[in-house]
Image (cartoon, rainbow, N blue to C red):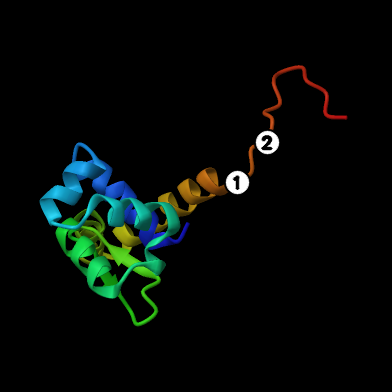
Amino acid sequence: MDNLTRIIRSEISKQYRSVRQFAFAVGVPLSTVNSALHNGVGGSSFDTVLQICKALGIKALGDDAAFYLTENTEELLTRYAMLDDYGRHTIDAVMKVEYERCTKEDEPEMGRGSVNI
């Protein structure tokens, strides 16, 4: 699943009770929204994707649309830009540690007295 589809799915679950409620509120047929979420928004018409993103407050950055902003990420970036060098350094360090924690492969933890063979 592409990044934009993941973001759309996440924002629908955060902002609406169901995909059906979202489709009704936006005025896009439920089958169209379900198809976009199941198959990826790449197969949907540009107008439909634009309408969905606008309703959810998702903004694209860059021509390749590799990065998308929600209100939350836009607020985080705005706050980050207002920090001094020390604050940015602190956030960068925390972000690196958390990224590594979330992306490392599931490795069995070695308990006390365990022998690694």
**Where residue 6 sits in the image (x, y, percent)?**
39, 54
Q: Quadrant of residue 93?
A: bottom left
Q: CA distance from mark 2 to mark 1?
A: 8 Å
Helix or strand or loop: what does disc 2 sit on? Answer: loop
**Where residue 68 sits in the image (x, y, percent)?**
31, 65
**Where residue 74 sits in the image (x, y, percent)?**
22, 61
Q: Quadrant of residue 53?
A: bottom left
* Amino acid marked by disc 1: Lys
Q: Quadrant of residue 45?
A: bottom left
**Where residue 49 sits in the image (x, y, percent)?**
27, 67
> Which residue is labeled 2 in the image?
107
Q: Characterize the local packing of mark 1: few (<14), some (14-19) or many (20 or more) Cα atoms within 10 angstroms.
A: few
Vertically, is 85 above or below 91?
A: below
In the image shown, does 74 or 2 lie closer to the viewer? 2
Residue at 11 percent of width and 50 percent of height: 25
Q: Which mark is residue 104?
A: 1
Answer whether labels 2 and 1 touch (C-beta < 8 Å).
yes
Residue at 60 percent of width and 46 percent of height: 104
Helix or strand or loop: what does disc 1 sit on? Answer: loop
Q: Characterize the local packing of mark 2: few (<14), some (14-19) or many (20 or more) Cα atoms within 10 angstroms.
A: few
